[in-house]
Amino acid sequence: MKTYKNCQSCGMPLCKDPKGSGTNADGQPSNKYCSYCYENGKFLNPDITAEEMQALVKEKIKEMGGFMKLMAGFFAKGVPKLERWKKD
Ligand SMILES: [Zn+2]
């Protein structure tokens, strides 16, 4: 099973997640999504688009301030490339 360093929905580093990660339907920690995006096997914003997620990520990261603030644009830009938004 692949483990990810960043949430595959919003792109935020999982190490910055206060809960460590989101949770799967069985209550086990998700290795793919953070607690802001994913809980108990469900996305907290199931209808959000990649574009809306980019805006959300920018806001959230700016709130964190400091070093992360400088990275806001970088993380937002990467959102459409994450697993959740990949279309094949
Ligand atoms: Zn996330």
Image: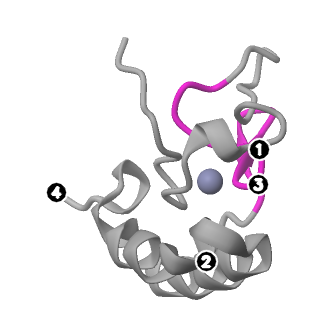
Residue assigned mark 1 = 35
Q: Which mark is residue 69?
A: 2
Quarter, ligand 1: bottom right
Near-viewer residue (49 or 60): 60
Beta carbon of the mark 1 residue lies under 8 A of ligand 1: yes
Residue at image location 42% in from the left, 31% down from the top: 4
Q: Which mark is residue 36?
A: 3
Residue assigned mark 4 = 88
Q: Quadrant of the N terminus?
A: top left
Comparing labels 3 and 4, the label whose residue is closer to the camera: 3
Q: Magenta segment range? A: 30-44
Beta carbon of the mark 3 residue lies under 8 A of ligand 1: yes
Q: Quadrant of residue 2?
A: top left
- Horizontal side of 85 relative to 19 (left or right) equals left
- Horizontal side of 34 relative to 36 (left or right) equals left
The kind of residue on which mark 2 rests is: Lys
